[in-house]
Structure formats: C-alpha cells, structure tokens
Amino acid sequence: MSSTLFSPIRLAGLELANRIVVSPMCQYSANDGCANDWHQIHLGMLANSGASLVVVEATHVERHGRITHGCVGLYSDDSEAALARAVSQARRRGTAKFGVQIAHAGRKGSAQRPWEGGGSLRAGEDPWPTIGPSAIPFGDNWHTPHEATEADLDRVRDAFVNSAKRALRIGFDAIELHMAHGYLLHSFMSPLSNRRTDDYGGSFENRLRFPLSVARAVRAVVPKAVPLGARITGSDWREGGLTPDDAVNIAKALKAEGLDFVDVSSGGVALDIRNPTEPGYNLAIAARVKREAGIATRAVGLIVTPEQAQAAVAGGATDMVALGRAFLDDPHWGWHAARALGGEVKLPPQYLRAGPKLWSPTVKG
Ligand SMILES: Cc1cc2nc3c(=O)[nH]c(=O)nc-3n(C[C@H](O)[C@H](O)[C@H](O)COP(=O)(O)O)c2cc1C
C-alpha cells in the first residue's frame, strides 16, 4: 500500500522525505532568550519522530519581541550560540530536517508563561513596553501597546533580517515568518487590531504593507535554495476580521514576494476569540489557499490521526500537515502513522529493531 502522506516533497532546494511536519511549539523555558538543555531534549526527542521537518518554536527577533521571559530569541550572539547548541545534536543525530519560526510578539508580548497564569506581566514581574499597529490591548487587563512608529517598523524589519541571517548561520533547513496567532505581523493585517489611518492601516493593501516589507527584506537575504515561508491566518473567526478570502490574497501576495510555502492556521487576534474545535478545522481554508494561490501549502489544527492526515494530503486539501499536540503526546507519531498506513519512515540505526519486524506475526524472540 502506498501512502501520499509518506511521499517526498521538494520546497525550493530542500527535499523532505514525507508530508509530516512538527508544528512550532513554544516551550517557555529559555533563559533570557537563550535555549538550553530542555530545548536539546525536546528537539532531540522530535528529531526521530518520523516527521520530515521539525519547526523550532516561535523564536523572537528582539528581546522586547518575546512573548514571555521564557521565550527563545535570535537577537544576540549569546542567543544564537545557545540555539545552535540546542539544535546541533538533534540535526546531527535525527532523521528530520529542522526549520525555525521567527517571530515578534507585538501586543501579545510581555506575558506570563502559561503555567504562571498566561496573562500580561504584572508590576514586579519585569514587564516591558509592547508595540502594536494601534494602541489597542489584546484583551482586558492586557498592556496597551504603543502604536508602532516608522522607526519601530524599520528596527523590527531589520531585526527579522538579522534573525534570518543568524538562522542561516546555525544551518536551519527552512525558515518561516510568524504571521498568525495575533502576533505583530498578523496584528498589522487584521482590521480588528489595526485601526491606523496612515499607509499601514485601512485598506487590505495598506494593512499588508508592513508584513510584506518584512517578507521582502528577509527573502533578500535567504538564498533561493533555502525555503522561506510564513504561517498565516485562515480566519480571525470574528465578524469584521480576516476571512478565508483574505487568506487566499495574503498567500498570493507572499508568493509574489518569493515565499515558497504557507502554513494555514487561524485565530488568536483577540483574547476572547475561540477557535473551532472540530478535527482539521483549518483544512477547508488551506484547500482554498492551495487551489487559488498556487503555493505549497501546509495545514495545521486538530489533525490528530494518521488516517486524517493521509486523507488531507491524498484528497488534495494540502501538500503537508503540521501536528503540534499529537507529537507531544506521541513523539514517534510518524512511525506509528507509517505502520498504520503502510508508509516507510527512516529509523536511526540504533532503533532499527523497533522497525516493521517487531510488528510482523513472524517475529522471533
Ligand atoms: C505548547 C504549545 C506551544 C505553541 N507554540 C507555538 C509557536 O511557537 N508558534 C506557532 O505558530 N504556534 C504555536 N502553537 C500552536 C501549534 O503550532 C499548532 O498550530 C496548534 O497547537 C494546533 O495544532 P494541533 O491541534 O496539532 O496541536 C503552540 C501550541 C502548543 C500546544
């Protein structure tokens, strides 16, 4: 039995063994932007998960662009060296390629770690000033961001470029820009968070101006062979917010800037918005993006079982799937999916005895 999920795909100069991606997941465990032994264990665990690509968590382009005090950064020599250390063993010893998501938290920054409340940092918790497109807080009891000035936008754009250069020095196989979940670039795109009256607000074209300028500047320093993509918003899930039509147009605009892929996620632009809870809730939007924008597409969001993932790819809704929580639950999810679907996955030599023979009825003790 052949499985589309386990067929290879090429993104720019990168050949991926299958269509399964580990979604970026913040660990809130860094020290002042520096990844540490937790990241080494976590990424090492996922390096031999059967996914062809592991995307490292939202990695912030400036210190005040972090979500929490525990978020990883790529904004200093120390943070670059720490991330290089954390991923180098995983890259050397794993079967997966490694990508990184570079991000700026914008008005969702200066927040507590989820297990410390997940709200905005209080006085005494070393909060920092945040920026956003407009001086509108993410929710009740959240910091009111400063409306980003032209100088802020120039600084942040440069910071994205510098982080991309650091990511390339580390040797990441792919880079993606975080343009979703209410963080800075998404907050510029969404009419719910962007009420500016200058060239960066109002029309769809104006709201995209800053995020697209970041994409253009980063593309200019990322060699063509290294895939550059973005996680985008399929829907804000709120009247007056971004819609699937907008997602198609965002993907088209990013493709025109030379990006190689988009990942379709959704939600997160305001505290009181809830995402749908049905399996694969972004798949129908991803299918439209793939069909109408004609860019390599990845879908994420409650894709949990191998059969669901296979159906999503084989049915043409998406080229790749990203899974988050399912990989935390089962770090060999890709192996188990291969077994269920008759696909093939590379095991490290040390683990070969856990391969198909283990599950064959003829196995001898
Ligand atoms: C612990 C955790 C951390 C996350 N951190 C990030 C992140 O750094 N960047 C991002 O784009 N999404 C992040 N997400 C969202 C996931 O990447 C994914 O889009 C979401 O969990 C839905 O996929 P799932 O249903 O397969 O988990 C995070 C999710 C979890 C559970």
Image: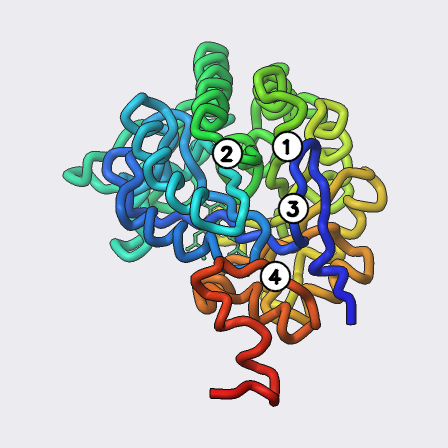
Q: Amino acid at mark 4?
A: Val
Residue assigned mark 3: 16
Q: CA distance from mark 4 to mark 2?
A: 22 Å
Which of disc 2 and disc 4 is earlier in sequence? 2
Q: Are marks 2 and 1 in contact (CB under 8 Å)?
A: no
Residue assigned mark 4: 345
Q: CA distance from mark 1 to mark 3?
A: 11 Å
The residue lying toward the viewer, choosing from 213 and 111, is 213
Whether 80 is drawn above or below 281: the answer is above
Residue 208's x, y, as percent?
Answer: 65, 26
Q: CA distance from mark 2 to mark 1?
A: 10 Å
Residue at (43, 35) in percent of width and height: 105
What is the number of the mark on residue 172? 2
Which of disc 2 and disc 3 is earlier in sequence? 3
Q: Amino acid at mark 1?
A: Pro
Residue 315's x, y, as percent?
Answer: 82, 61
Residue assigned mark 1: 227
Residue at (66, 27) in percent of width and height: 225
Q: CA distance from mark 4 to mark 3?
A: 12 Å
> Quadrant of residue 322 in the image?
bottom right
